[in-house]
Image (spheres, rainbow, N blue to C red):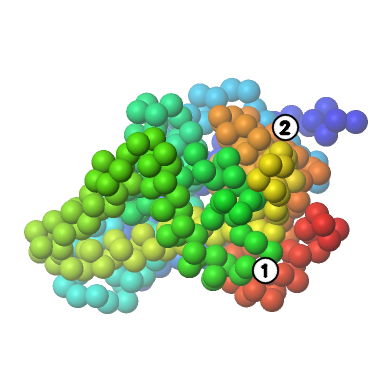
Amino acid sequence: MDVHTELKPEPWIVHLLGLISPILVIIGNVIGGIYTSMGVIFIWIICPFLDIFFGKSSKPRPPRESGLPFEVLLWVHGIMHIVVISTFFYFSSQQSDINRWLITASLSTGLVSGASAIVTAHELGHKKPKSPGWLLARFLLFSVHYPHFTTEHNHNHHRWVATEKDSASAKEEENVWKFWLHTIPGQFMSSVNVHRSKGRYGFNNPSYQGLFLQIFVTMILFFGLTNGSTIVFGWFLASIIAILTLEYVNYIRHWGLRRNVDERQTQMHSWNTEARWSRWSLLELTRHSDHHLKASTPFWKLQPHPDAPELPAGYYACWWPCLIPPLWRKLASPRLPHRS
């Protein structure tokens, strides 16, 4: 019997839960002090427990057909992130030196950028180039010093996922710490090569242009503003946290799943999970197999694939085990297709 026949799609309103983290970070950045820790506490401590508390759907809910609420929600997330970054710059400009609250605010801002803004940019990055949604995605990525992501993700990762040609796909013997070290520069160079294949060399290469623009804006902030050094330090730290969060997600979505370059990609080359909290707050990012099978499918129409590899828990709950490689392997290795 089809898993969809007895179930109805979940209401779109559950995805509003993803706005909790940016709201908390905005409040923390405005009030300052210990309140800057709200984003860290919520994402790193509370959300893993919510992943466990809400559990997984025993029978996957079918996707929705109506898209308007979800299109609006993407823009709400994008605009919310602009407010997050604006309030963070305001908070940083009030700090005369690097202190614990600046570091805490940077962590909170970086985490919510990874969990909300980059998720939104990932979705909008598949829109038609130069469209309003695509341009918003580029701005969101620029705000975390990762503007090349859309190029690399769309033109290399989707084509070569789970192969030796994709630096965003982790091998089974690779832990997340090693993965971070090679995937970040690897993806940048991959985006450079994508543009080179189209005849864009040197400064005419958009990936280099994005890098130089980041450096230019950073220098203006550093030398042109009062307390510019604290702003730049905080922004750089927040971006590092956002990028590491994004690449952690890349790690768990393809870890240990391999294919030959001439082998057809299937749902078996991406990890999925029906963990409710991760699905609701991360815009169905957890239904990753279907996204790879047809990248143009909007997140609200992604199909579940019950036969695909299933993560031990939701994205939030996998975070801490993933940072401890022996624990991660103990939890995830038995679930690899060639081991189960």
Comes first in the chain, label 2 or label 1: 2
Q: Name the residue type under label 2.
A: Pro
Residue contact between numbered discs 2 and 1, judged by CB atoms under 8 Å = no
| Residue carrying label 1 | 173
Badge 2 marks a residue whose secondary structure is loop
**Residue at point 29% right, 61% down?**
235
Decide: few, some or many residues near mark 2? Use Cα within 10 Å; few <14, some 14-19, many ≥20: some
Q: Is residue 177 visible?
A: yes
The one of 64 and 272 positioned closer to us in this rendering? 272
Q: Is residue 94 left or right of residue 270?
A: left
Residue 102 place in picture, x, y as percent: 29, 70
Quadrant location, the N terminus = top right
108 lies above or below 281: below
**Residue at point 38% right, 47% down?**
192
**Residue at point 28% right, 57% down?**
88
Give the Cα distance between marks 2 and 1: 35 Å
Quadrant location, the C terminus = bottom right
**Extreme right residue here?**
1
Q: Is residue 48 visible?
A: no
Q: Is residue 302 left or right of residue 219?
A: right
Return the mark for residue 124: none
| Residue carrying label 2 | 62
Badge 1 marks a residue whose secondary structure is loop
108 lies above or below 259: below
Residue 100 place in picture, x, y as percent: 32, 76
**Residue at point 33% right, 71% down?**
103
Residue 3 place in picture, x, y as percent: 83, 34
Decide: few, some or many residues near mark 1? Use Cα within 10 Å; few <14, some 14-19, many ≥20: few
